[in-house]
Amino acid sequence: MQPYSCARDEFQGEASVYLDANESPFNGPFNRYPDPLQNAVKEKIGKIKKIRPQHIFLGNGSDEAIDLVYRAFCEPRIDNVVAIEPTYGMYKVCAAINDVEYRKVLLDEDFQFTAQSLLDATDSHTKVIWLCSPNNPTGNALNRDEIIRLLESFGGIVVLDEAYIDFSSGESFTQILNNFPNLIILQTLSKAWGSAAIRLGMAFASPEIIQVFNKIKYPYNVNLLTQQQALRSLANEKQVIYWKRIILEEREKLILDLSALNMVQHIYPTDANFVLVRVDDANAVYQKLVSEGIIVRNRNTVSLCLGCLRITVGTAEENQRLISELKNIDAAE
Ligand SMILES: *Cc1c(COP(=O)(O)O)cnc(C)c1O
């Protein structure tokens, strides 16, 4: 297919008079179309993550990259994808939107998987396998050896969503991206980078895959305000490292405080900025927290998560408010 060719694709470089794109000459800098390939942002991300820009796709959140994976690799009503279960809900939503069959393979009781169990669910029309590590909503990192085994034995695309990698004690797969031409890694500015509002998601993959994404994306998929704010956020890496340290300290405190509550049956190990907790009556606890203005995520109806609440680590003050409310609920039982 022939991609849309925008004015700024045809001419690259510096000029003093731009009369090529039917833009307004007034109200700079917002009168001009933004860089369709976000080169400045990719340079900066590339330096931080030690990845060359031709291995980077940027989108309107990771959500855009998730949708593009289906549009690029799956034929509606013919192909299918396989995913671990439970996991992030967007993989399934985008499968349905693109009319692609979505096959789930249940994790084990430790929320781990084997490459073989996923391969067993594939057939000749399976184009993509979805992994998420650390996984949402379970919080744990997936077994690294099994991820590698899957990458080596599956002939299609493996997507590894690393939205929470900054909070993990484990290493990112970005450093071994070159070993696996079928690997797509997703990361985001929405979590550790504190920039969910600007909508900037990243996909790291072979240049061949990145070129396919660039071909099928909307020409100006990341707007100028987002590109500018992303550059500001990315210049503040020290701040992010500091935030991360606080969140990890608060996570440990939160786990300690939760473990002292009667209602808490189990706290699952976490490598993310949230904790999955099994409580006596998840729906009741959820509703009582809501009535006090505290919102957690009720995961009670999610596979393997019966009775579970997913709690994001907040500030020390927010976590204390949660714990004191949970103590009240405990005392009233
Ligand atoms: C939060 C989250 C994202 C982030 O999505 P954005 O569209 O980049 O905000 C991606 N994957 C998972 C698993 C998440 O939990």
Image (cartoon, rainbow, N blue to C red):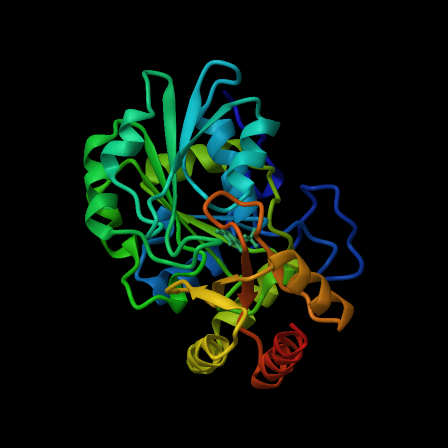
Residue 23 in view (yes/no): yes
Is 73 displayed left or right of 219 in the figure?
A: left
* Residue at screen point 52% across, 74% down: 262
* Residue at screen point 34% across, 49% down: 109
Name the spot of residue 106 as percent of width and height, x first: 39, 38
164 versus 68 height, above or below: below
Closer-to-camera residue (333/193): 333
Residue 11 in view (yes/no): no
Closer-to-camera residue (190/300): 300
* Residue at screen point 34% across, 62% down: 49
The total number of labels drawn is: 0
Name which quarter of the figure residue 159 lies in.
Answer: top left
* Residue at screen point 77% across, 54% down: 25
Name the spot of residue 196 as percent of width and height, x first: 60, 62
Is 50 displayed left or right of 25 in the figure?
A: left
Name which quarter of the figure residue 283 lies in.
Answer: bottom right
Name the spot of residue 72 as percent of width and height, x first: 47, 28
Is 162 displayed left or right of 298 in the figure?
A: left
Closer-to-camera residue (130/322): 322
Name the spot of residue 295 as percent of width and height, x first: 68, 66
98 versus 274 height, above or below: above
